Image: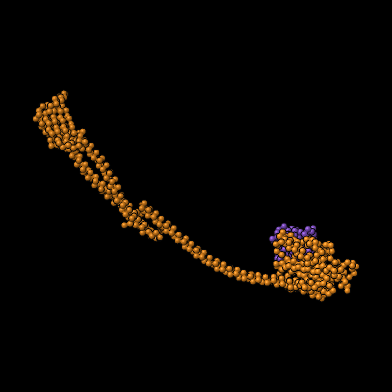
Chain colours: A purple, B orange
């Protein structure tokens, strides 16, 4: 695991061996402009093949963040080269509902709420 | 005369004085040694002379004593007195009687202590007179001679005087010679050296070196000149180095001054840039302030007015909206239609600021258009709204999207509903926060809208995700709509207010009027937030059937 982006209350970590990107902490950035670095990293992380997005450690994601994940999912869906798996946590209240949208946007996405 | 020169003159005098003392002392010592040897020689000479004299008159003296002839004896002593050194001569017979005696009277009185001291021990001679006849010897008398000390010392004195005079002359000669040589060899070169040194310019010691002293090229003075010149040269080098260093320092100082001036100019330029940026920033701040004002006004100006809300018969409606410092894109609308129908719209545009405000305004217009057009199919309504907003957002070059739930409230039960306790119902479509229904008695029911749609503006086609649910309402039921600004309001520990706490407040106040419930919720949310800034807009709608009205009947009629 290496930390690729670190903010005041959050971090984005990347494990190249398992191709897992993990978002952790509290993400309350203002608008998609502030989410751009994270979005750029996620969309550039895996050109093709499997990729896991681990959100279990993400305690909070505001609506702009959810929009960012939605757009990322749409991009992956359109690219058709990446097999995306999203791992969420039942313990984190926002994820249960919000992550459903990702499945709607990309039916082939594997969603594991642990 | 320079002090150095006088000092050297003084040196010459001192040296001369010392030389005089030393030479005189040596001369005196030498004179005394000479005198001593002279004295010895004189004594030997006197004794030898006396022996010779006595030997010469020995025969005649013996004869005079033997014959006891005073005449003969007188002749003998007379003869002795011819010798200047003899003062007294006496001839005695063998009985000790005086035969003849002679003395220099004029000299008897003349006495000299020094002469007595020098020669006193050799002044008196006694000679026994012996007559030799065959083998026998007969003593016939005695000869006594007394020498004159002055006569003896006279020669010695003369020699001593000559010696002293010569010694003095010699001493003076040596002194003159030594002083002269010393002056010529040491003092004069030193004086020249001192003069040459006095001519040296202290500011340029190496400019005129001390000239080599003639004849002193390879001696100590020559070495002294060399050392002095080396010292001067070294001093000049030191001065040169100092001058060079000073010049370098000056150059550095000038360079530093130039650089400081340059830097000052740069700083001034930078300052000007900063001032310019500041002006831009101020302008930007003003612009942003204006933008926020505009955003806030856009948001506020399209909200339903209090008069509108009061005009909704049969429903007790309370609303609340507080924009965040940086306005979020919360949207709500309440449109009163025919037959007691009330259309509610609530949504949340992502992000903050003018763009979110514009999307919110767009949404409001589009929703109102659709409501006015009275499109019956929720799928069609949301699909058209999504496409309108999606394409407009694309045109804006924006990346906004929004949640949007639409409520179509209708008095009376839905078609085919047999339960007569149902006095009204509402159809809900679109994805937004869960809608809360507080049932009569305080039971809370949550209507999840996740499966009723998708955020608008994200993709151009959402029709397949849109669905509609119908919720039946009975008297006393209260419906609460809100945005995530309420549920995600955070305290200083980043604890979210949460849906559970919201439901708790509603359950406690289910019987109260909408206004009271709304106030209770807002007060509780504000308590939770404390001093934290408001991150997002707070939007809240509470409505319930007005007690005692019978919308069902109105609807049926």
Please tell me which residue is depicted at 78% across the width and 68% down the height of the picture. B318
Q: Which residue is the extreme one toward the bottom?
A: B373
Residue B500, x across and y down, in percent: 79, 61
Quarter holding residue B144? top left
Q: Answer whether residue B368 is visible to the viewer in this image.
A: yes
Q: Is B260 positioned to the left or the right of B108 in the image?
A: right
In the figure, residue A49 lies in which quadrant? bottom right
Q: Residue reaching furthest top?
A: B136
- What x and y, as percent, mark residue A95? 78, 61
Q: Nearer the viewer, residue B476 or B5?
A: B476
| Residue B33, position as x, y percentages in the image | 26, 40
- Residue shown at 23%/45% (left/top)? B166
Give the total number of marks visible in the rendering: 0
- Tell me where residue B512 sits by quadrant: bottom right
Which quadrant does the N terminus of chain B fall into? bottom left
Residue in the image at 84% along x and 65% along y: B476
Which residue occupies the foreground of this view, A60 or B45?
A60
Q: Which quadrant holds the C terminus of chain B?
A: bottom right
Between A11 and B240, the residue placed more toward the observer is: A11
At 51% from the left and 65% from the top, the residue drawn is B257
Residue B190 shown left or right of residue B45 in the figure: right
Q: Position of residue B313 (x, y in %)?
A: 82, 72
Task: Looking at this view, name the residue that lies furthest to the front.
Answer: B548
């Amino acid at each position: 695991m290496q930390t690729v982006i670190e903010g005041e209350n959050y971090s984005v970590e990347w494990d190249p061996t398992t191709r897992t990107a993990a978002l952790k902490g509290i993400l309350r950035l203002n608008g998609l402009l502030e989410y751009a670095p994270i979005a750029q990293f996620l969309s550039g992380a895996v050109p093709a093949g499997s990729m896991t997005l681990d959100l279990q450690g993400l305690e909070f994601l505001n609506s702009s963040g959810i929009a960012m994940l939605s757009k990322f999912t749409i991009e992956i869906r359109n690219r058709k080269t990446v097999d995306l798996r999203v791992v969420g946590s039942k313990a984190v209240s926002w994820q249960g509902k919000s992550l459903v949208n990702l499945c709607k946007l990309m039916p082939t996405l594997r969603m594991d709420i642990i | 005369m320079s002090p150095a020169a006088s000092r050297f003159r003084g040196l010459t005098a001192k040296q001369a004085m010392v030389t005089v003392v030393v030479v005189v002392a040596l001369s005196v010592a030498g004179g005394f040694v000479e005198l001593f040897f002279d004295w010895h020689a004189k004594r030997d000479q006197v004794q030898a002379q006396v022996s010779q004299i006595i030997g010469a008159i020995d025969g005649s003296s013996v004869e005079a004593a033997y014959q006891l002839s005073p005449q003969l004896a007188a002749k003998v002593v007379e003869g002795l007195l011819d010798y200047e050194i003899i003062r007294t001569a006496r001839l005695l017979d063998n009985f000790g009687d005086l035969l003849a005696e002679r003395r220099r009277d004029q000299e008897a009185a003349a006495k000299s202590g020094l002469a007595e001291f020098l020669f006193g021990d050799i002044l008196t001679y006694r000679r026994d007179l012996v007559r030799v006849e065959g083998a026998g010897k007969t003593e016939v008398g005695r000869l006594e001679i007394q020498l004159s000390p002055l006569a003896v010392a006279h020669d010695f004195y003369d020699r001593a005087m000559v010696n002293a005079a010569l010694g003095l002359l010699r001493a003076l000669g040596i002194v003159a010679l030594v002083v002269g040589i010393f002056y010529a060899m040491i003092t004069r070169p030193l004086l020249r050296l001192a003069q040459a040194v006095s001519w040296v310019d202290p500011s340029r010691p190496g400019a005129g070196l001390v000239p080599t002293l003639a004849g002193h090229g390879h001696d100590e003075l020559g070495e002294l000149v060399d050392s002095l010149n080396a010292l001067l040269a070294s001093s000049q080098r030191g001065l040169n180095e100092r001058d060079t260093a000073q010049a370098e320092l000056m150059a550095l100082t000038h360079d530093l001054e130039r650089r400081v001036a340059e830097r000052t100019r740069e700083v001034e330029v930078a300052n000007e840039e900063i001032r310019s940026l500041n002006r831009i920033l101020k302008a930007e701040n003003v612009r942003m302030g204006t933008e926020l004002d505009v955003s806030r006004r856009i948001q506020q100006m399209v909200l339903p007015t209090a008069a509108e809300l009061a005009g909704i018969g049969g429903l007790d409606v309370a609303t609340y909206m507080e924009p965040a410092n940086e306005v979020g894109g919360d949207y709500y609308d309440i449109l009163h239609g025919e037959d007691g129908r009330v259309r509610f719209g609530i949504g949340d545009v992502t992000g903050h600021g003018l763009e979110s405000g514009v999307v919110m305004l767009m949404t409001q217009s589009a929703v109102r258009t659709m409501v006015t057009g009275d499109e019956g199919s929720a799928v069609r309504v949301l699909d058209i709204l999504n496409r309108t907003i999606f394409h407009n957002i694309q045109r804006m070059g924006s990346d906004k999207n929004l949640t949007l739930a639409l409520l179509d409230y209708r008095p009376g039960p839905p078609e085919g509903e047999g339960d007569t306790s149902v006095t009204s119902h509402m159809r809900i479509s679109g994805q937004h926060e869960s809608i809360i229904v507080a049932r009569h008695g305080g039971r809370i029911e949550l209507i999840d809208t996740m499966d009723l749609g998708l955020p608008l503006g994200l993709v151009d086609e959402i029709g397949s995700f849109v669905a509609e649910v119908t919720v039946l309402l009975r008297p006393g039921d209260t419906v609460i709509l809100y945005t995530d600004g309420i549920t995600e309001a955070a305290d200083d520990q980043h604890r979210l207010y949460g849906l559970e706490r919201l439901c708790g407040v509603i359950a406690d106040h289910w019987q109260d009027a909408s206004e009271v419930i709304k106030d209770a919720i807002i007060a509780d949310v504000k308590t939770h937030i404390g001093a934290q800034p408001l991150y997002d807009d707070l939007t809240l709608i509470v409505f319930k059937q007005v007690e005692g009205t019978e919308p069902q009947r109105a609807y049926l009629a």
